[in-house]
Image (cartoon, rainbow, N blue to C red):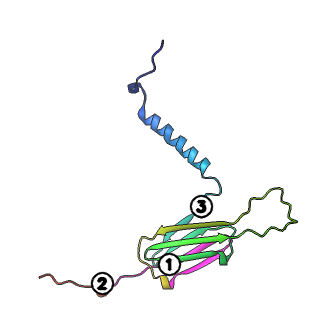
Amino acid sequence: MKRSPSFDEFAFEDLFARMSRQFEEMSSQLDGPRSPSREMAIDLRDESESLVAVVDLPGYANDDIDVSIDDQLLTVAAVRESAEMDEDDRYVHRERRSTSVRRSIRLPCDVRADDASAAYNNGVLTVTLPKRVVDDDDAHRIDVE
C-alpha cells in the first residue's frame, strides 16, 4: 500500500493560493447578478474641494432614490416597485420584481451636508459633497497650566 505524501512535501503557499481561488470562484457564483453590492457599486473620488460619490443604480426613477448624510456616513437607498399584475396578465417568464437596495459608506472627512447635491442620469447617481474646511482660528485652544 502506497503512503500519501507528508505535509512537508506540499508547498503550502500553492495550497493556500488554490484554496483562495476556489473561494473567490464560489463567492462570485453565490453573488449572482441580484446581489446588492453588484446592483449598487459605489466609487468615492476625492477632489480638492469636495468628495464625489458615483453610484450605479440602474432601473430606478429619481423619486425611488433616497440619499442621506449622518455625521461621516453617506447612505444611499432605493426602492423599485414592480408593476401590478392584472388577472389577464399571462407571464411566461418574469424576473422584474420589487427591489430595494441600501448601501452606506464611511466618508474620510467631514462634509457640508447642507451644500451637498445629487444628480441622477442614465442609471448613475452622482453625489457631490463639499468638504468642511476647519479653520485654525475656529479651533478651541486649551491653556496648559
Residue 16, percent across and down?
Answer: 45, 38
Tell me what residue is drawn at x 56 percent, y 76 percent: 67
The residue that disc 2 covers is: 136
Q: Residues within 10 Å of mark 2 (few under 14, many from 20)?
A: few
Give yes or no for residue 133 being in the magenta stretch: yes
Disc 1 to disc 3, C-alpha distance: 23 Å
Q: Residues within 10 Å of mark 3 (few under 14, many from 20)?
A: some
Residue 114, percent across and down?
Answer: 49, 85
Q: Earlier in the sequence, mark 3 or mark 2?
A: 3
Tell me what residue is drawn at x 47 percent, y 39 percent: 17
Closer to viewer: mark 1 or mark 3: 3
Q: Secondary structure at mark 3?
A: helix
Tell me what residue is drawn at x 39 percent, y 82 percent: 133
The residue that disc 3 covers is: 36
The range drawn in magenta is 115-136
Residue 18, percent across and down?
Answer: 50, 37
The residue that disc 1 covers is: 129
Identify which amino acid the numbered label 3 is placed on.
Pro
- Residue nearer the viewer, 61 or 109: 61
